[in-house]
Amino acid sequence: MKGTITQRSPGSHSIIIDIGKDPATGKRRQKWHTFKGTKRGAQIECARLISELGKDEYVETSKLTVGQWVDQWIDAGAPGRRRKKVSQRTLERYGQLLRTHIKPVLGHRLLQKMRAPDIDKLYADMANAKLIAPRTQHHVHTVFGALLATAQRKGLISANPMVRVEQVPAPENFDPDDEEADDIGDGLTEKELAALVAGFRPSSIFAVVALATATGARRNELLALRWSDLDTFRKTLRIERALEQTKKFGIRVKPPKTKRGLRTIDLDDGTIAVLLKEQELHLRLCAGIPDGAEVDLSLIRLPDDALIFPAISVSFTTPRHPRNFSRDFAAQAELLGFGTTRFHDLRGIHSTALLDAGIPVHTVPQRIGDDPATLLRNYTKRKRLTQADEKLSGTIADLAAGFLGTGTAC
């Protein structure tokens, strides 16, 4: 394989690479490239192209723009490293981020002409404008990086300019499948948590709050629970589905966000009592029996797919609106003096309490259906209970006493 260079006009050269004869026709095959710059620069580019052809890394010249590739990638389901389509809600979020923050600025640029300085300027402008939160800026970076990585994997670009970017938006806790995830919320002491849960007793969402606090389950997992998932004899709750809310399909049921999400959770007697009371309410409503009236509720049957926490004003099988539920929780929490506590924080509070209590680190993520690394990373950032810090200090003091001889070991 060899290449030749001819000058077309001052500052413009043609690079012709001979790639041998076509095995089918026997005709000579060549690849032509136009190079703007000096002859020395053309020689360097010619050597690079020959090297890429020899390593089967050559990328055909294309006029595909960044904006066109954004549309193609989204239409294909935004496949990433695992070469799988993302969920519909995640796909809509990706499309929103790219079409709002990437296409207006870089959409007209040729995809093969994208360079790291272009991305650096985009990120700097976003940071200086302060129109979106740092976390959203990080979302943009993550999705844009996946877009460019797929372009390189498909052979549309020879190198991913994202690897040469100087500085990226900093927030770390990005999970495209979890719209509730955000910056790490503060923890609550046992007394504060008890006050929060007790404050919801008069409300229609008390049972959901109590179950979330007792299990650390996600909001969309809780709202998809059916009575058939509850085993009062074994004192367990099976989580095998979750709600998903998208513009295309509305609210629908899907499997949990990860394989870890499929799990069985042990329940305590108090939580089971709360759920049985909720079930009794549903049975009375189903049969039109007022509270206090003596009746054998075992004769009443709810639908087989009845939800534990349905939109009961509609039907026993209609799920609640997830975002409306979160707003209802936030409004009540504000009235109780817990305005900074979000419903999703109950998940973190539950896992933090278990870790503080000495529950093995491999057991806690199994219970909440999370990745152990993510759990520990968030744990280090969340405010822990004072008792846990005191226990840690005491343990360290006893350890030091043993090897330093500063005290009497027990």
Image: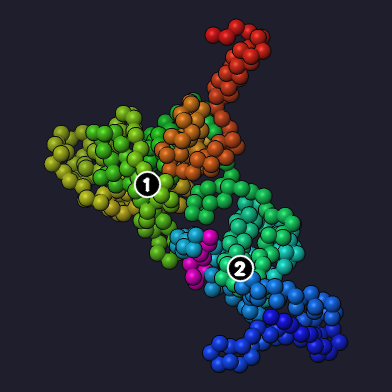
Place residue 387 in its image quadrant: top right
Element assignment for label 1: loop
Element assignment for label 2: helix
How many angstroms separate mark 2 from mark 1 (CA)? 34 Å
Which of pointers 2 and 1 lies earlier in the amino acid sequence?
2
Q: Residue at x 75, y 64 (%)?
A: 117
Residue 276: x and y in percent read: 27, 36
Residue 79 counted in the magenta span: yes
The quarter in which the C terminus is drawn is: top right
Residue 272: x and y in percent read: 30, 33
User: At label 1, which amino acid type do we have?
Assistant: Leu
Please give the label number shown on residue 152. 2
Q: Residue at x 55, y 24 (%)?
A: 388
* Residue at mark 1: 262
Read off the magenta span: 74-81
User: At label 2, which amino acid type do we have?
Assistant: Gln
Q: Nearer the viewer, residue 337 or 355?
A: 355
Q: Residue at x 65, y 83 (%)?
A: 19
Vertical position of residue 385 compared to residue 295: above or below = above
